[in-house]
Every structure is written in structure tokens, then in C-alpha cells.
Image (tube, grey):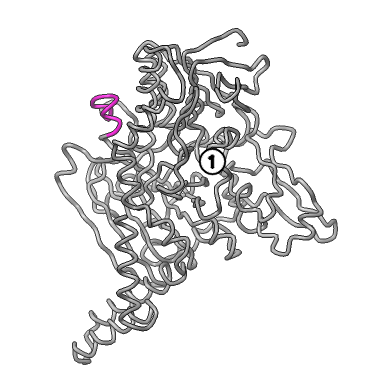
Amino acid sequence: MADERFDAIVVGAGPAGTAAAYTMAKAGLKVALVERGEFPGAKNIFGGVLYRKQLEDLIPEWWKEAPLERKIVEQRLWILADDSAVTFGHRNQRYHDPPNCWTGLRVKFDPWFAGKAEQAGAIPIYETVVTGLLRAGERVRGVITDRDDGELEANVTIIADGVNSLLGKQLMVHREWRPDEVSLAVKEIIQLPKQTIQDRFNLEGDEGCTIEIIGHTCGMAGLGFLYTNTDTLSIGVGVMVSDLKKKRVKPYEVLDGLKQHPAISRLIQGGEVKEYSGHLIPEGGFNSIPALAGDGWMICGDAAQLVNAVHREGTNLAITSGRLAGEAAIRAHEAGDFSASTLAAYDEAIRASFVYKDLKKYRGVHSLLAHEDAEQLFHRLPQALNDAAYEMLLVDGVPKRDKQRKAIRRVKEAAGGAYMDLIRLGLKGWRAMNG
Amino acid sequence: MSASIEERLFTIRYKADRVSHLIIKDQEVCLACPTKECNWFCPSDVYLWHEAERMTSVAYENCIECGTCRIACPEYNIEWLYPKGGYGVTYKYG
């Protein structure tokens, strides 16, 4: 390995790294794709939604050959209280063609995608941990791996080593994440017969549905999810690590609470747990994005906090960032210049893309979730909304005017007691979502 | 259908290295830690404080490599590395 020299080294064969490797290999660059797992995807977990558009920019009609679970035609949002739910949703036949997104499983998807990069000419170096970066002053000139003679040299190194990004920390592009900049998600794969899933979720054939869940997270800032796969369900819950620290509750007990909720238990009933998993989600948002490029390096995907937590989008931001980094590397290769000023083209491309614009729009959400009272937003308000709905729909002879008054009072009290509290919270929420 | 953590961890395929990739830097720091919150926040119950032995034990072979402990330990007392290439957790679904 010692005398191998590459045009580019990509660290991490997840969606970001593979997108970068594929882009560069296709343009004829000599690319090494390094992955610490037994195979790409071996260590990778996500909630479960893969989007069409951003991968289509790379591989036209990719979904016709990729291993996918169900095509999402309905997205639901459930706001839970202890034994009730207020539900919203959108179902649309137009999501059939062109498809918008699918559920997926990373152990199937990631190897397929990495296989495309290999076919394009990227050289796979799997079961290999990158332990450090080779430096020449400020310049990154390659990586150090845990293999014997494990140094690999390249003109440019693309860091796509995921949310923990030990390399990003070594490079000092980010310090350690604060506990409020990451959420811990735990997830289970529950197996059920195909037909049972379709009956329970009102689906036919390869149609799928997603449910995002607010509330019932023990008063912690977080979101639950329940997604339909072909013959399994993905159920999980992610909570802000700073809240988890305070609560002294085990992450899997939060998941148990969700599974026991009466609106959810009947959907998963009779299923067999096939796999338990856990992963951090970068949720610092816009203000946590580090410097994206420097002398001989670029950083992509989760490692750069490129996750839109509000819309639970991640793999698509990863793929776009990887593609843009790959394109910047190709231009640097053509120019024979891999300095920070040339690779800054990647940073500019990100700024011009939806990745940056979407994260900027929601820039205030992180501080809202980190600094507002999580008990209020994720327990008292969902509870009040459910109580208000119960009140309004219960026909018990109480005049509707009185019911409405009582319903509004419940929500108002959960917001702090006065109308002004409710308005203030509403405005804060609006600003956080439209920064 | 709530499973115990043991049953849950049984669903995951591991290839454990002989040496731990997680190291408590200083057991005295654990002794002085008033919250010992690692006993709670870890999703695979890797950390357990033993009052008699005055130490935190590390069941690294159960680690699912999420990184929470490295970030959440109030004293940053956990040295966290990836297991060697090919070792550690390998998911079947993901």
C-alpha cells in the first residue's frame, strides 16, 4: 500500500463519500474509497427515507435498479399524548410518478451505491480505519490507516467519515460537538408479513407510508418515526443528547414507551424484532456547519452537520455535498492545483445549492430546541392539543362555545398562561423556521 | 413486545476485538462524578458503575459505535476510537 498514490482519497463509503468517489472516478480520476466496515453500509443506520432528486443528478433513473423498500405515497404527522393522537397527513397519487422518495435499508442500499462507484473505477479499500491525516504544514496530503504500511497519499482527501468525524476533529475544522448539537436515535426493525403491513397502513403493492411522531418522548426534544418497509417496519426515536443527559432515562426505554402507545402498538403488534440499532444524528443545523474546504481537503455529509432535521432529510444532502466536492476535485485536478483557494469552489457550490439555503432557512430551530423548555414543547403542548381536540369532538351536552373556550385555555396554559405567551411562542417558532 | 437490552443486543452481529476501543481515562474521575450519567445514556448499556470496586466497567463488546458517550460524559473521561477495520458492529438491515 505504501507506494500507492491516488488523485483522491475518500474516507467513508456512506452516501456522501460514495457520491464523491463516483463523481471523480467517472471523470477518470484515480480514487480510493476507504471504509471501516466489513462492507459499505455495515455500520450505517438512518431513519429510512431515500429521496429521488439528488441521486438522479448523479445516476439517471437510479431507482429502477437500486434496492429500495416502499415508494412513499403518504406522509403522516402524529402528535401524541399519553393515550391519544392528533394526526395530520398528506397522501397523493402524484407521488407515484415521478416518485418522490422511498424507504430503504442501508445494509442493502449503501453496498449498491458503492458498487456503482467501484464500477466507475473507484478502488475499494474496506475493513480499514483511517486513524489520521498525513500533513505537510497546513496541507493534507493523504491518510494513515490501521493497515500495515497503511499510508495512502493523494492530491486531495475527502472527509466523509460520518457524524463522529474524528478526522474533522483532528483537522480542527470542528471541535467536539456539544451535546445539544447531536441527537441519539435508537431504532428497531420489526418484521411483519407484507400483506399485514399493507392492510394496517392502507397501502397496495409497493406503496409505502411514513409517520413522524411528536410527543411521548419523556419530555425531551426529539422525534419518533414509524416507516413501512417491504416486509418490515422501522420504528425509532431520536432525542437531543443534552436532554438525555438530564433525564436519566435509557434511550431504549423511550422507544419502549413509543411502542406501547395505543395508537402505535396495534400497528406493530405480532411483529418480530429483527434488529436493534443506534446512531447519532447531527442536528446543530446551519450554525454548526464547519469550514468545508482547505489545502488538500474537503468535508461532506454528516461530518459537516449537513442534515435538515425539520424535514428529516440527510442522505440527499450528503449525496449532493459529495457530488459537489467531487466536482470541485475534478476542476482542481484539471488545474493541477489543490490549494484552499481552488477547493473553495466546493464551499461556493454548497452555498449556491439547496443544502445551504434549506439549512439557513431553519437556522433558528436548533436554538429554539436547545433553549426553550423541552417539557413544554414536547410534552405539555402535545398534551394540551390532544386535550383540546378531545374536548371539541366530545358530544356531551356542553355548549360548543364553552368547549372552545376551554380548549383554547388548555393550549394557552401549556404555552405559559397568557395569550401573549402563546403569541410569543408562535412567533419564535415561525422565526426559527424562517431564519 | 418490549425486549430487554440483552435480547435487543442479541439481534446485532458483532466481531469483538480482544482490546477495547473505549477507555476510561481516569477511574478517579468516575468516582468523583456525581451523576454517573453514562450508566443511563448509553443505548447498549456499555457502562456500569460498581460501588464496591469503585470503578466503571466497560462492556465494549456491546458497543454500537454511536459516539454518545464521548460527547455526553460530563468530564470527557472516555477515550473513544473506532474498532479496528472490519471489527465491531455489522448491521443486517441498517
| Name of the residue lying farthest toward the top | A3
What chain does badge 1 belong to? A
Q: Secondary structure at mark 1?
A: loop
Picture quarter with the C terminus of chain A:
bottom left
In front of the other: A355 or A390? A355
Is B10 within the magenta? no
Is A56 within the magenta? yes
Picture quarter with the N terminus of chain A:
top right
Q: Amino acid at mark 1?
A: His
| Name of the residue lying farthest toward the front | A341
Residue B42: percent from the left, percent from the top?
61, 52
In front of the other: A55 or A97? A55
State which quadrant residue A388 falls in.
bottom left
Mark 1 = which residue? A174
Can you say whether A6 is above or below A63 in the image?
above
Can you say whether A7 is above or below A315 in the image?
above
Q: Residue at x 74, y 60 (%)?
A: B33
**Which residues lie in the magenta part?**
A54-63
Task: Judge left or right: residue A17 versus residue A355.
Answer: right
State which quadrant residue A246 falls in.
bottom right
Residue A13: percent from the left, percent from the top?
47, 27
